[in-house]
Image (cartoon, rainbow, N blue to C red):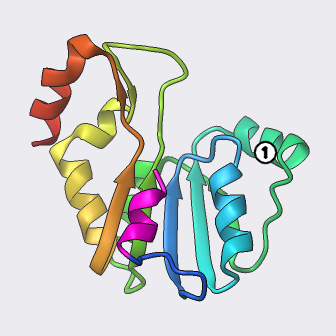
Amino acid sequence: MTAVSFITYALAQNHSGNLLMIGLGGSSLNNFLAQFSGKLNITVVELNPAMKFISTRWFDLQESSSHHVIIDDGVKYLEDNIKNPLKFDIIFLDACFNMLTNGTVCPVDVFQEENTIRMIQQNLGTHGILTMNVAISREDDENFLKNVS
């Protein structure tokens, strides 16, 4: 998931910028990026407070003034942030179901809706990029492509 950001130079070791992650998981990616470049402002939005607890206790999540986790609905955060002049250089979308439902695990259905995709675009800077984790069953390939195209 992170490779695209490095290939496009959106993430370089001394790059400063604003990064939004929707979905915390075990916090491995945001922890790595916080260590990789102290100049990134990393905002993680996670729906489930238990994930923040688990990440802090077991995966060494350490928040700082430039690396913070917000417990909120990712779509609500995107909607609330549209009018904010601060835009994101990179948005990592890793919002997943815990189990297979309707053939799609990642991203959850709401992030496949046209209005949500538009809000993601409105939160990106001029040269910003979106990277998303996609996990679908073979049977659901066509439905997923239809939803996001």
**Residue 69 at x, y = what percent?**
67, 59
In this picture, residue 58 sits left or right of residue 9? right
Query: Does 92 appear in magenta?
Result: no
Residue drawn 52% across and 58% down?
21
In this picture, residue 7 sits left or right of residue 35? left
Q: Quadrant of residue 104?
A: top left
Q: Quadrant of residue 15?
A: bottom right
139 shown above or below 12: above
Magenta residues span: 1-8
> Is there any visible trace of residue 69 in the rendered image?
no
Q: Residue furthest front?
A: 7
Crowd tier of the residue under label 1, counting other residues whose Cα lies within 10 Å: few below 14, some 14–19, many 20 or above: some
Q: Which residue is mark 1?
A: 55
66 shown above or below 115: below
Query: Does 6 appear in magenta?
Result: yes
Q: Nearer the viewer, residue 28 or 76?
A: 28
Figure disc tally: 1
